[in-house]
Amino acid sequence: MDLKVKDMTLIAITVALTFVFGWFFYIIANLLPIPGSKFVGVTVFSSFMLYFPVYKLKRHGIIFAVTAVLAGIMSLISILMSIAIISAGILTELLSWLFISDFKSYKLRLVTGSFSLFGTFNSLIITYYLAGGYGFKLTELIIPFVIMILISFAGGYLGAYLANYIIEKYLFKTF
């Protein structure tokens, strides 16, 4: 992938803002007494932030670049979170290669919204198998997992929709 200096700058700014403000949303989500809320709580924000560089740079590979840098930074805090982020980025990037050609349609919102779906799914699987899902059978957790994943996708799509709205309403001439 051929990245120019302005592309790398936009990716770096996106990652920095995602890291700083993402902690705020993560802490707020942890205050909710709902299992899995920390995964679901950041869905709107993460897709919102991911949408901007993909929309601006309009090419494949940007989702992977943003998530790879973010995962690298997050690995200093939690290797499990880093694995969830990079694997969600890879899955989202693959989905973008399959469905996005113009980087402006509803497909872009669906794909960037799916980052939250993949992130939550990967986090739930990693948490279950690596951090211990003892005391529960996987079949007992399917319904809560599906509910959290669907909420994550809805939140992710909402984040991408809000980012698209802001771009078209307020930033279209400058963005």
Image: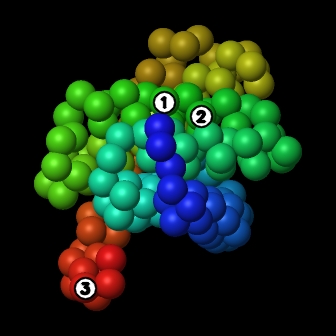
| Residue 161: percent from left, percent from top | 27, 64
| Residue 129: percent from left, percent from top | 68, 16
**Number of the label disc, if any, that sits on residue 86:** 2
In the rendered view, does 118 fall on the left or right side of 95? right
| Residue 41: percent from left, percent from top | 54, 57
Q: What element carries label 3?
A: loop
Q: Label 1 is placed on what type of residue?
A: Ile
Q: Is residue 142 above or below residue 81?
A: above
Q: Distance between the residues labelled 3 and 2?
A: 32 Å
Q: Disc 3 marks which residue?
A: 173
In the rendered view, does 17 fall on the left or right side of 108? right
Residue at horizontal 76%, vertical 49%? 73
In the rendered view, does 78 fall on the left or right side of 138? right
Q: Say if residue 21 shows up in the picture.
A: yes
Q: Say if residue 35 shows up in the picture.
A: no
Residue at horizontal 55%, vertical 29%? 87
Does the CB distance between marks 1 and 3 fall below 8 Å? no
Q: Is mark 2 on a helix, strand or loop?
A: helix
Q: In this view, does 51 lie above or below 149?
A: below
Q: What element carries label 1?
A: helix
**Number of the label disc, if any, that sits on residue 122:** none
Q: Which of marks 1 and 3 is nearer the N terminus?
A: 1
Q: Disc 1 marks which residue?
A: 90
**How is colour applied across the structure in the image?**
rainbow
Q: In which image quadrant can residue 93 be found?
A: top left
Q: In which quarter of the image is the C terminus?
A: bottom left
Q: Label 3 is placed on what type of residue?
A: Lys
Does the CB distance between marks 2 and 1 fall below 8 Å? yes
Residue at horizontal 36%, vertical 28%? 94
